[in-house]
Amino acid sequence: MSDLAITPNLSDQDGRRATLRLVVFGIEGQHYALRLSAVERVLPMVAVSPLPKAPSVALGVINLHRQVIPVLDIRSRFDHPPRNYGLAGHLLVARTRERILALPVDEVVGVQEAAGETITPPGTVLPGLGYVEGIVTLADGLIFIHDLDTFLSLDEERRLAEVLEERAG
């Protein structure tokens, strides 16, 4: 992930307003985003294998080029109902500081640039809005920029690492 801080006064080396490149995706009609620099690829939905003993946020794992990647339930983090994606969904494969993971989403809208002045820190809108590092205000709505490094609690991260290690061993 980039070290670019999310503030209303983002600027580049020339003092101009900086832009943030985002991969925008939809869940239940609401738009969310990840930094483009964190996204590895977008895949059509594939079968997810169960991962016994994993934290409840882990839906299971996929095998991507012989790499076991956990699939995490972003829908539950944002209080959306569970969904059986079938072949209609997509998986966003992204990097955190700890690992590569996949997030099932309803749709991938595309890549969008957001100017620094359109990004609001989440604490100024709703204190305690975990998992969100910024909110982009557009004429037709809001986009919540998701912070994958805060997606898992320390306990969930530890449990997931243990289960993945056991599976690999």
Image (cartoon, helix red, strand yellow):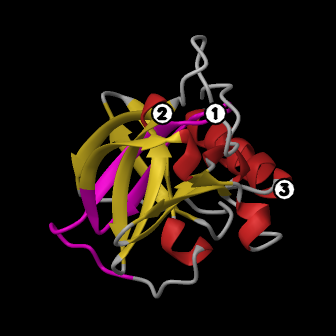
Image x and y of residue 155, in percent? 84, 56
Name the kind of residue labelled 2 in the image. Thr
Residue under label 1: 10
Name the kind of residue labelled 1 in the image. Leu
Q: Is residue 148 above or below residue 80?
A: above
Q: Which residue is painted at 24% across and 65% down in the image? A: 89
Work out how far the residue at label 3 is from the one at label 2, CA to CA, in angstroms: 34 Å
Is residue 88 a member of the stretch shown in magenta?
yes
Q: Residues within 10 Å of mark 1 (few under 14, many from 20)?
A: some
Does residue 153 appear to the left or right of 45 in the view shown? right
Residue under label 3: 155
Image: magenta residue range: 83-108
Q: Which quadrant of the figure contains the N terminus?
A: top right
Foreground disc of the pair 1, 3: 1
| Pointers 3 and 2 in contact (C-beta within 8 Å) | no
Work out how far the residue at label 2 is from the one at label 1, CA to CA, in angstroms: 8 Å
Residue under label 2: 19
Q: Is residue 136 above or below residue 140?
A: above
Q: Secondary structure at mark 3?
A: helix
Image x and y of residue 50, in percent? 46, 62
Locate residue 84: give its quadrant. Answer: bottom left
Q: Which quadrant of the figure contains the C terminus?
A: top right
| Pointers 2 and 1 in contact (C-beta within 8 Å) | yes
Is residue 158 a member of the stretch shown in magenta?
no
Image x and y of residue 145, in percent? 54, 54
Image x and y of residue 128, in percent? 82, 69
Name the kind of residue labelled 3 in the image. Asp
Locate residue 164: give its quadrant. Answer: top right
Does residue 93 appear to the left or right of 42 in the view shown? right
Q: Which residue is painted at 33% across and 79% down in the image? A: 29
